[in-house]
Image (cartoon, grey):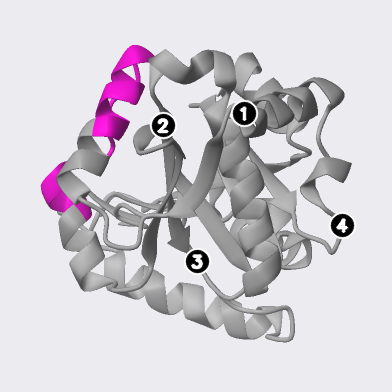
Amino acid sequence: MTPEKAISPRRATFGGIETNTDVPLSALQIFVQAVFAEVSTVPFLELRSFPDGLNPELATHLHRLFTEAGFRVTTTELNQHLSVSSLPIEQYLHASTLRRLRKSEREGFTFSEWVEPDWPQVHAFIAEARRRKNRPMTLSLEQLQQSIQQLPGIFRVFTVRQDTVLAALIVTVHINNRILYTLYPADDPAFLSSSPLILAYAGLYRLCQREGYELLDLGISTENGERNEGLIRFKNNLGAMESEKRTYTFFFPRK
């Protein structure tokens, strides 16, 4: 919160209100009124809500609450996620993606957790991968390390290597016991022909099966509503499902 605006969340992938559908709408309305009273000194309040696909019933419940309270939807992003079942990941992969997965396995690439990651190396690897795609880093090394220290056990790093050479990695965030979020996927251009990120996502899906997660959140595939068709296709070929992720804004009347 600043004198100019109040935003939920400050840096996390989504914020807003976390509740369940057993809570009556009247109780949530009282809660929203209390939030208004707390932040009404700023010009506007912004809530970046969770993707609908992570909890469709609750998303519908909250959308009604927000719109009735006077919020308006200012941005709608496309989010994609994998629904984790007892079926192997291979059952969901597009034929071309399955072929690329098998190719990386034949070439000796392996998936594993980096139990004690070198965070400066992790950050530099991700930053370089994002630079190639003209995408800025959303967290500095200092901000990432601060988050890791404040939230022990929440951030993990998973890698794909050929022998000891790092080919790809994904930083994950434990959202709750149901949801694992993929924060920063990154790869080395020297290995693009071997598609190591496909092996990384397959490895994460299997990890979700072992650890009891129900959803692997792959994040948004749009930027301010603008579709990244290549990224959308890549995730769909992994078996991803699509849903909307909305940003709600409430403008307080000028006093």
Q: Tell me the amino acid under the disc marked 3.
A: Ile
Which one is closest to the eye, mark 3 or mark 4?
Answer: 4
Q: CA distance from mark 1 to mark 2?
A: 16 Å
Dominant secondary structure of the magenta stretch?
helix
Chain-order first, disc 1 or disc 2: 1
Q: Tell me the amino acid under the disc marked 2.
A: Ala
Mark 3, secondary structure of its residue: loop
Mark 4, secondary structure of its residue: loop
Q: Mark 4 highlights which residue?
A: 87
Residue depicted at 28% across the width and 25% down the height: 136
Q: Which residues are magenta?
A: 125-144
Query: Farthest residue in the left direction?
Result: 142
Q: Which of the two residues, 186 or 3, is positioned nearer the viewer here?
A: 186
Q: Mark 1 highlights which residue?
A: 104
> Compared with residue 18, is residue 94 higher up or lower down, i.e. above or below?
above
Q: Position of residue 178 (x, y in %)?
A: 64, 71
Q: Mark 3 highlights which residue?
A: 175
Question: Quadrant of residue 28 in the image?
Answer: bottom right
